[in-house]
Image (spheres, grey):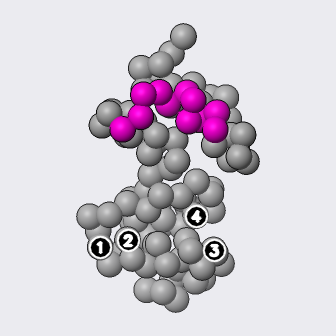
């Protein structure tokens, strides 16, 4: 299994996460990188991105707003397209 993940030439962290998630199907891998998401899809590993994680946190009452957290992650270097931001805000019930 680790050879299959290594063939994608991902970072050590992503490779370890995918190897774990493949052995433990009840878990999701949290990844944002497009190549990593493609690898996960090919391997049958369920994923969740940072934005999806924020929506889930709001639904569970762990955070009050997704908008503020999205702005924080964008300010810290994570790229999210405007359409993805709007989708996440819609999923969180925060559409203007």
Task: Give the vertical position of 28 relative to 96 (above or below).
Answer: below
Q: Residues within 10 Å of mark 2 (few under 14, many from 20)?
A: many
The residues bearing labels 3 and 1 have C-alpha atoms spaced at a distance of: 20 Å
Of marks 4 and 1, the one in the foreground:
1
The disc, 4 or 2, on the residue closer to the chain's N-terminal end is 2
The residues bearing labels 4 and 1 have C-alpha atoms spaced at a distance of: 18 Å
Task: Give the vertical position of 70 relative to 13 (above or below).
Answer: above
- Circles 3 and 4 in contact, beta carbons < 8 Å: yes
Q: Which residues are magenta?
A: 62-72
Describe the element under mark 4 as helix, strand or loop: helix
| In the image: residue 61, left or right of residue 87 | left
User: Which residue carries the number 1 mark?
Assistant: 24
The residues bearing labels 4 and 2 have C-alpha atoms spaced at a distance of: 13 Å
Q: Which residue is the extreme one toward the top?
A: 96
Q: Main secondary structure of the magenta part?
A: helix
The disc, 3 or 4, on the residue closer to the chain's N-terminal end is 3
| In the image: residue 31, left or right of residue 1 | right
Describe the element under mark 3 as helix, strand or loop: loop
- Count of number-bearing discs: 4
User: Which residue carries the number 3 mark?
Assistant: 10
Residue 19: where, in percent of width, then height? 43, 78
Q: Quadrant of the N terminus?
A: bottom left
């Amino acid at each position: 299994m680790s050879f299959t993940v290594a063939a994608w030439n991902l970072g050590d962290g992503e490779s370890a996460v995918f190897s774990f998630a493949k052995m433990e199907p009840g878990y999701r891998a949290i990844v944002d990188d497009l190549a990593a998401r493609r690898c996960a899809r090919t391997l049958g590993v369920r994923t969740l991105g940072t934005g999806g994680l924020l929506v889930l946190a709001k639904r569970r009452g762990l955070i009050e707003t997704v908008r503020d957290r999205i702005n924080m992650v964008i300010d810290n270097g994570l790229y999210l397209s405007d359409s993805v931001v709007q989708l996440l805000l819609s999923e969180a019930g925060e559409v203007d």
